[in-house]
Image (cartoon, rainbow, N blue to C red):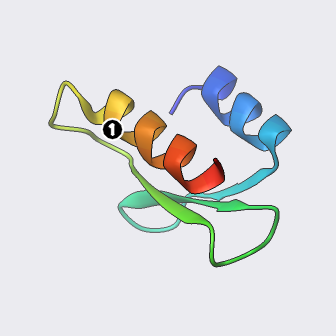
């Protein structure tokens, strides 16, 4: 995760933690809205899949 992506997610209201093999993004401090973000992705579509997951969660 780049600093720009991290900053963007934080501006949207996510809290990012980096424990373990994945980042954990929690929306507005509500654990019902949690997204796991892999630190190392093996799939070229990982970014698109993550964006889709976040969009579906929020809207």
Left or right: 43 as drawn, with respect to 5: left
Q: Horizontal and vertical percent for residue 36?
A: 44, 59
Left or right: 11 as drawn, with respect to 55: right
Residue 52 position by quadrant = top left
Disc 1 crowd rating (10 Å Cα; few below 14, some 14-19, many 20+) is few
Residue 31 position by quadrant = bottom right
Q: Horizontal and vertical percent for residue 43?
A: 16, 34
Q: Horizontal and vertical percent for residue 1?
A: 50, 33
Q: Nearer the viewer, residue 46 or 42?
A: 46
Name the residue at 37% across, 30% down.
47
Residue behind mark 1: 49
Left or right: 48 as drawn, with respect to 59: left
Judged from the image, the secondary structure of the residue bearing numbered disc 1 is helix
Q: Which of 5 and 3 is in front in this view?
A: 5
Q: Nearer the viewer, residue 55 or 40?
A: 55
Left or right: 42 as drawn, with respect to 1: left
Q: Is residue 57 above or below residue 41?
A: below
Q: In this view, does 25 lie above or below 42?
A: below
Name the residue at 63% across, 77% down.
32
């Amino acid at each position: 995760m780049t600093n720009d992506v991290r900053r963007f997610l934080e501006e949207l209201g996510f809290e990012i933690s980096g424990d373990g093999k994945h980042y954990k993004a929690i929306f507005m401090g509500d654990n019902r809205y949690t997204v796991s973000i892999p630190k190392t992705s093996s799939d070229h579509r990982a970014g698109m899949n993550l964006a889709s997951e976040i969009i579906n969660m929020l809207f």
